[in-house]
Image: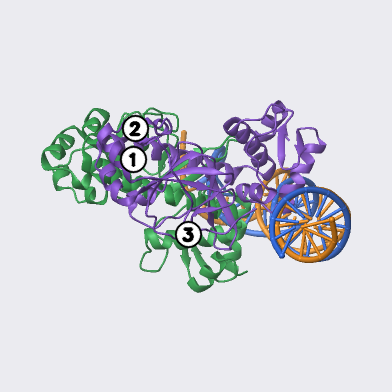
Chain colours: A green, B purple, C blue, D orange
Amino acid sequence: MVRKLKNKHPKIDKENGCENCIIRHLNALKDLDNITLAHISDSKETLAIDKGELIFKEGQTLKGLYCVKQGNPRLSKISDNGKDQIIRIASKGELLGYRTLVSGNKTNLSAVALNNMEVCFIPKEQISKLIDDKRFTKSLLVFISNELKESDDRLVNMAQQNVKQRLAQLLIYLDNNFGCDKKGFINLSLSRIEISNILGTSKEGCIRMISNFRKENLIDLKGKKIKIINFDAMVKIELGFT
Amino acid sequence: MVRKLKNKHPKIDKENGCENCIIRHLNALKDLDNITLAHISDSKETLAIDKGELIFKEGQTLKGLYCVKQGNPRLSKISDNGKDQIIRIASKGELLGYRTLVSGNKTNLSAVALNNMEVCFIPKEQISKLIDDKRFTKSLLVFISNELKESDDRLVNMAQQNVKQRLAQLLIYLDNNFGCDKKGFINLSLSRIEISNILGTSKEGCIRMISNFRKENLIDLKGKKIKIINFDAMVKIELGFT
DNA sequence: CAAAAAAGATGATTTTTATCATATTTTTTC
DNA sequence: GAAAAAATATGATAAAAATCATCTTTTTTG
C-alpha cells in the first residue's frame, strides 16, 4: 500500500510542546533545559504520515531532524544492483536524520512509513543550537555509538548466517521489539518483499522459507500477520541447529 | 604469524608529545588546545605492537583510548557460529576504543595488528577530560557518523553482492587505501583466510576465486602480495558485469 | 463490483557457495 | 636444516540460494 510522496505532509496541531512530550525522554533531547526545548517546540511541526509514504529519500539534503512520535519507518538504501536493502526499522522516540545533521552530508538512507505515523520535524536552524549543547551532543554520541555497534552486529550476521537463521532471528526480533496482539500475532506486519529486503534474499526464497516454517508448525500465519508458535525451536534455528 | 597476547606491549620512549604529533591532525584530537594536549601527552604511552599481536579482545573493558601512529589493525568479531568476521581495517591516525569510551560498555570488537604497529595509549582517566571538551566531542560525533554510514554501506554490499563482486571490491579498496609498491603490488598483504574473513566466505572459495582472477589475468600474485593488472575489468566485476 | 495490479505460492532448473578430501607449497620452530 | 605446522591449491560433491515460469489469492482502483 505504497502511496506517492506528497510534497507536504499534513500538519497536526498539538496542544503540547516538547517540554511536555514524553517521547523525547527516549532520545538525545531528554537532557535539554526548558528554554532550549521551548525554542525547539516553537519551531517544530508535527506531521501525519500515512503507511507507505516516503519521509525522506537517500541523496536528499535534509532540512531538519525528525523525531518519531508514533509508528515505524523502515530505513533502507538502494544497492548498486538496484535492490532495496532495509538497514533497520526505527521506533517511537527515535531521531532520524541526526547523522546527516552532524556530518553535513546528504542522507544515505530512505525512510518509508511501515504504518501510519506521527513525526515531529525540527528545522535545521534550531538544530545548530542543539549541536552546541553539550548534553545533547553527549547523548547523541552515546546513541550513535550504540547504532554503530548494532550495525556491525548486523554485518556479522549477514555475512555468517544463512537465510534460515536470518529469518528466525528477524521474527524473534520483531516479536521482542514490536510486541504482539492478544492472539500472539506480531504487531508490525511486513510484506514478504519487505522481509526479503531485510534478509537480503530473493522474494521467492523468502516466501518459501516462511511457508516451510508454517509447515513445520514454527509459526502461524493470518494474512500478512505472523505468530511465533515454537519459540525454542526458533531460537535453535537462529543459532544454526538445523 | 599470529603471536600470543603479551600482557605488556613494549613501551617506546618518544621525545615528542602529542602537541607536536602530526598524526593527531587526522582524528578528533586535532582541535584540542595545547594545555589539554599536554595533559594527555604526559599520561600517554607509546606501544610497539608486532604483526599478529592482539591489541584488545572483544568483551574486554578497555582501559583507555588507542591512537594508531603506524601500521594497520584489523577489527573483527567472532560470530555465534564461531567464525571470525573482519569488520574493517584501521589506518594511521585512527582512534580505537572510542565507542566503548563513549557508551561505557565493553568493546564488541577485537583488534589485531596486520603489520608491525606503533600505537599511543591514552588512559581512561585522561579521557573523561576529552569527553567534556566540546571540540573533541563534536569531532568524534562527525567521525562516528561517517563510520555509521560506512558500516551501513558494508551491510548493503554484504547482503546484495556475491563473493566475486565482494572480492573485486576489496582488492580495489585495498589498492586505493593502502597503496602499492613500485611494482604495483598492494602494500597491505592479507592471508587468504583473512580475506575470506572480510568477505564472509569459506577459505577454499576465496582461494579459488583469487586463483581464477589470476588465470583471467586480472591480478598478479607474488607470495601473499597481490597486484591488480586490469583495473577496468575489476571495476566491472565489482558492479556485477559478470 | 469487476478489472487490474500486486502479493503470495510453488515447481523446475541453474547458479553460487560450502564442505570434504587430499596434495603441494610455504613458513615456523626446534 | 629437518620436522612440524600452517597456508595454499584443486578436484569432487553436496547444500544453499537465485532465477524463471506459472498459477492462485488478495488488494487496489476506477
Q: Position of residue B169 (x, y in %)?
A: 63, 36
Q: Secondary structure at mark 1?
A: helix
Amino acid found under the numbered disc labelled 2: Glu
Instruction: Read off the chain for label 3.
Output: B
**Above/below status of A148 relative to A125:** below
Residue at position x 22%, y 34% in the image: A132
**Do residues under tags 2 and 1 come within 8 Å of each other at their CB atoms?**
yes
Q: Secondary structure at mark 3?
A: loop
Name the residue tied to disc 2.
B19
| Cα distance between the residues tagged 2 and 1 | 7 Å
3 and 2 marks on the same chain: yes
Name the residue tied to disc 1.
B41
Q: Position of residue A239 (x, y in %)?
A: 55, 66
**Quadrant in which residue B179 is drawn:** top right
Q: Is residue B24 left or right of residue B239?
A: left
Q: Earlier in the sequence, mark 2 or mark 1?
A: 2
